[in-house]
Image (cartoon, rainbow, N blue to C red):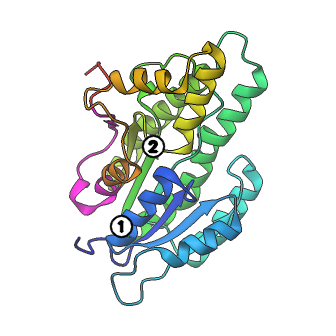
Amino acid sequence: MEPVLAGKHALVCGASQGIGLASAEALAAMGAEVTLLARRADVLQALARELPVVVAGQSHAWIAVDAADTAALRDKVASLVSARPVHILVNNSGGPPPGPVHGADVAAFEAAYRQHLIANHVLAEAVIPGMERDGYGRIVNVISTSVKEPLAGLGVSNATRWAVASWAKTLATELAPRGITVNNVLPGSTQTPRIEQIIDTTVARTGRSRAEVYADMVAAIPMRRFARPEETAAAVAFLCSPAAAYITGVNLPVDGGRTRSL
């Protein structure tokens, strides 16, 4: 892989596992200096040491913070960008707990919006000035295919993901004249802890076996398998690259063909 992102600094959220970690690895392999952001300092410290180093002087770092703690998130990212501007922002966070929208507590919506929409906005506001100064800006939000088709049993998540997608589309239009792109990657069922949570919830709600639930989920995917995190990360990395300079404001499903809408 060519180091086309050499000299660029990427901030990757939810980077301790799954799609976030895979995205960090892909960006590092393209030459970017990566800062991992998640809650667990000990895990992040170890992961940062293991990220690829493909160009001279390339180094990686980490920030331990809960994205739902808006004040702490703002302070830590402000400190980061004061020392080193961020050219690539990957917004990624675990989804809200599964469950129907009817009967959902208001507090569940407030928590989800803070962890996703508000956190994304705080991060974007912190990094955009540096992107403008250095003439390179990529913001990629890892959301969900529920942006195109609401998913059964994910009521709070569906509502929150749509809000993030609308925010991103608006931001993309505003930032386009400055050469900063904003795009959304929409994962389908992916082999991450999140999919395990969804399967477990379905088993508990329906009384069906785990094997039956898994088989039905896979049968709904034309490729007949779940995605691997690195496959979704490849789409993220492309949208962060110079090759994607004229792509902005899009929702890109990475779902094996599961989404039926255009």
Q: Position of residue 107 (x, y in %)?
A: 78, 26
> Can residue 100 be seen?
no
Residue 73 found in image quarter:
bottom right
Q: Residues within 10 Å of mark 1 (few under 14, many from 20)?
A: few
Residue 28: horizontal and vertical position, in percent? 39, 71
Quarter holding the C terminus?
top left
The mark found on residue 191 in the picture is 2
Closest to the observer: 25 or 217? Answer: 217
User: Residue 250 magenta-drawn?
Assistant: yes
Residue type marked 2? Gln
Task: Based on the picture, tell me whether residue 106 belongs to the magenta stretch.
Answer: no
Position of residue 188 measured from the top left corner of the image (x, y, whole percent): 40, 33
Residue 222 vs 254, above or below: the answer is above
Q: Which residue is mark 1?
A: 135
Disc 1 and disc 2: Cα gap in Å?
36 Å
Q: Residue at x 51, y 71 (%)?
A: 85
Q: Is residue 66 above or below residue 145?
A: below
State the image quarter where residue 53 is shown. bottom left
Is residue 64 something one can see in this rendering? yes
Q: Which one is nearer the viewer's eye here, 139 or 82?
A: 139
Q: Position of residue 222 (x, y in %)?
A: 25, 26
The residue drawn where x is 56% and y is 65% is 36
The residue closer to the viewer here, 215 or 98, is 215
1 relative to 64 in the view: left or right: left
Q: Are marks 1 and 2 in contact (CB under 8 Å)?
A: no
Indicate the quadrant containing the N terminus: top left, top right, bottom left or bottom right: bottom left
Q: Quadrant of residue 42?
A: bottom right
Q: Amino acid at mark 1?
A: Gly
Segment colored magenta? 237-256
Q: Is residue 202 left or right of residue 41?
A: left
The image shows residue 6, relative to residue 206, as above or below, that is below
Q: Earlier in the sequence, mark 1 or mark 2?
A: 1
